[in-house]
Image (cartoon, helix red, strand yellow):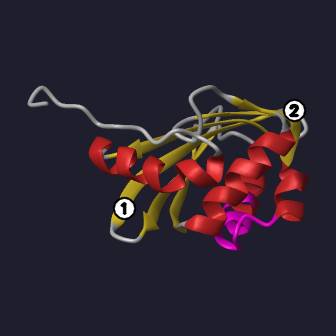
Amino acid sequence: MTTFAPHRDTVEFFVDAMHGGADKDALSGVLAEDVVLYGPLSDEPLTGRDAVLQAMQGVGAAAQLTYKEVLTGETHHAAYFRLQIEDTVVDGMDHIWLDADGKIAEVTIWWRPLPAGVQMQGHLADALGMQPWELRTNEE
């Protein structure tokens, strides 16, 4: 018999809060104080509730975010989504680890395909205080 990770309700609440425009008060309640965010939103991991909230709100304000499915494994959860700004669309996955209290302790974000991910980062760079990325190919 398969055992599933506890606190799926936390992840579902997180998804609902992100659909609601990344509501700061709602997200504050499910993020651990020392939450870490890895992914395309910063060159380095973002650490701490305030930094992670700021990034999530930046994305929530700038993009149309639609979560498609929450997946639960034995030790973790994941949420599959589609993110769109203008004509740029990425499919993505939030890989989510929860602490013993059921708060989100770590999120790793993946986007695909790569060209659209680079374009998406360019749309979000100003709002997140980053330099826009540049995709280089062998032809350049």
In the image, which residues are magenta?
14-23
- The kind of residue on which mark 1 rests is Val
- The kind of residue on which mark 2 rests is Ala
In the image, residue 67 above or below residue 107: below
Identify the residue at horizontal 28%, vertical 45% (top origin): 115
Q: Position of residue 36 (x, y in %)?
A: 73, 31
Does 111 lie within the magenta span? no
Q: Earlier in the sequence, mark 2 or mark 1?
A: 1
Identify the residue at horizontal 38%, vertical 55% (top origin): 90
Contact between marks 2 and 1 (CB within 8 A): the answer is no
Q: Which mark is residue 122?
A: none
Residue 71 appears in the figure: no
Q: Position of residue 66 (x, y in %)?
A: 52, 68
Residue that badge 2 annotates: 100
Q: Quadrant of the C terminus?
A: top left
Identify the residue at horizontal 41%, vertical 38% (top origin): 133
Q: Quadrant of the N terminus?
A: top right
In the image, residue 37 above or below residue 128: above
Label 1 SS: strand
Quarter-of-image position of residue 35: top right
Q: Which mark is residue 89?
A: 1
- Count of numbered tags: 2
Badge 2: how crowded within 10 Å, few (<14), some, or many (20+)?
Answer: few
Q: Position of residue 22 (x, y in %)?
A: 73, 64
Identify the main secondary structure in magenta. Answer: helix
Left or right of 61? Residue 36 is: right
Q: Position of residue 61 (x, y in %)?
A: 65, 67
Does 22 lie within the magenta span? yes
Please identify, in this view, whether the residue under mark 2 or under mark 1 is nearer the observer.
Answer: 1
Left or right of 126? Residue 36 is: right
Quarter-of-image position of residue 39: top right
